[in-house]
Amino acid sequence: MSETVLYDVQGPKARRRVLIGSVVGAVLILAVFAVAGVRLAANGQFEADLYRPFIEEPQLYERLAEGLRNTLTAAVYALVLASVLGVLLAFGRLSSTPLVRLPAIAVIELFRALPLLLLILGIFLAYPIVVGRSLDPLYALVVGLTLYNGAVIAEIVRAGILALPRGQSEAALSIGLTRGQNLRLVLLPQAVRIMLPALVSQLVVLLKDTSLGFVISFSELLRTGQQLVQFFGNPLQLFTFIALIYIAINLALSSLANVLERRQRRTVGSSATMAPTEKGAVR
Amino acid sequence: MDSVLDNLDVYVDGFTTTVSLTLVAAVGALILGTLIAAMRVSPVPPLRGAGSLYVTLVRNTPLTVVFFLVFFGLPEVDITFSFFTFAVVALSLYTAAFVAEAVRAGINSVQAGQAEACRSVGMTFGQTLRLVVLPQAFANSIPPLASVFIALLKNTSIASAFFVADALQRTQGLINSNAQAVLWILAGTAIGYLILALGASLLFSLLERSVKVAR
């Protein structure tokens, strides 16, 4: 057990209390599951018919794979575009010209403060009225995700650049590089290494947010699941299955972030790591 | 422009629902999240395990999926509520995982020397927690909690897809009836969310300053 501020190494009395606590806690948790299980059974949620599609209908998996492909497509497009936008906005915010800096700050703060669903739905509803042509929901989703995540990534990039030792900038400028060259050739390549774990964590958030596509009828994983529910009539089983798919992908991404973070801590000195609060992805 | 001003009462209605969703879900998430954080820092293995399992599962599930599971799952265990309460439950369950992480980080950020000092001057376990550890942990978890609750405010908009007449659903209604003014209507909604989000972060920074521990 890790060292903690709350208690000392346990003596015999404390160990006995922990044992009692363990038994009581385990019984309580199991009791909650038992009550839920009994009620689910009473409502027929364990009947074989609800699970049969998972075994007998290969098209269920084909449809879900198709939905997953669409989810990943939207996520990859949005990630690439948001990274480009994020780097541009971060450079803008670090600019010495107020004419560039202030608009960049405004854009970053605006898109970070608005609900993502408002962006996506707004784009999807406004585009046909303003332009007169309907919009592929994939584009509405990707643009919405790009604007929000671009603003978030801008802050990650900025924090990564600010975490670098000042000597880097000073050296670059003193040998005659322009401010732009300094950012592009010296600071950004080093910052990318520092911020890689934070970027991968943000990818988890982005991947989760692609599920908002179901609101504008984009056939990503969740929307496909919803359609399958209407066909097979087993919402609880299917949505649980879909949740497990998201959890599996996101856990894989999180462990990648952890590996990157450990490797970075080994290679880069402790002087150039980001503060933990900058890393935590909230949504 | 007129379609915004003429429908100000619709906006007010919608944002009132958004704010009440946020506040009720925030209280729920704070209670459940603190409980889970307490489980995770307790010396009792089954509780620690259950706490970290909950956080891992919920943090990696999209909120929309949580909404679907709550809407279809709770009735199957004989729990039925209004749509508003269902939305509150889904938002609370989801946000609680993030609250738990913020509170746990706050507790872990208190240095072990603080508790050792308490014990060496003869304070009991309860006194140590109440007078020294928890006040500092609380102050340290305000900044991450602020981000969590502002994210919650934005996340309430997902309830609009689940039959709750929040600001976003009201906006969709307005767009349907005044299609030509779609940009004005969206701008009105955006300003509403901006005011709420900026107001909330201002409140939290004031709170942060007032509970800051002098070191």
Image (cartoon, rainbow, N blue to C red):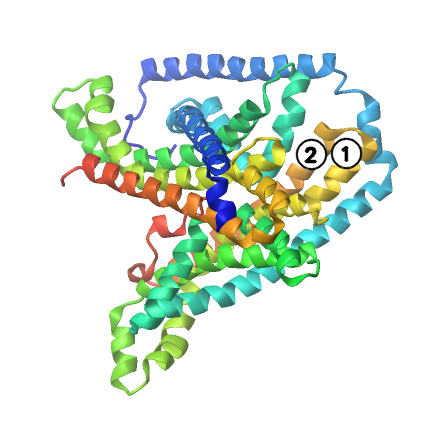
Residue drawn at x 64%, y 63% is A131
Give how far across and how far down residue A152 sits, in percent.
44, 56
| Kind of residue at disc 2 | Phe
How many marks can you see? 2
Residues at badges 2 and 1 in contact (C-beta under 8 Å)?
yes
Q: Residue furthest left?
A: B121
For the residues tagged 2 and 1, is the chain the same?
yes
First in sequence: mark 2 vs mark 1: 1
Q: Which mark is residue A81?
A: none
| Kind of residue at disc 1 | Val
Give how far across and how far down residue A212 sits, in percent.
61, 45
In the figure, is residue B114 to the left or right of A191?
left
Q: Is residue A76 above or below residue B80?
A: below
Instruction: Give the letter of the chain under mark 1.
Output: A
In the figure, is residue A56 to the left or right of A177?
right
Residue drawn at x 82%, y 41% is A60
Q: Which mark is residue A239?
A: 2
Q: Is residue A2 above or below residue A174?
A: above
Query: According to the image, label 1 marks what residue?
Result: A229
Give how far across and how far down residue B69 sits, in percent.
64, 30
* Residue A84 in sight from this viewpoint: yes
Q: CA distance from mark 2 to mark 1?
A: 8 Å
Q: Residue furthest bottom?
A: A176
Give how far across and how far down residue B103 sits, in percent.
35, 33
Instruction: Give the letter of the chain under mark 2.
Output: A
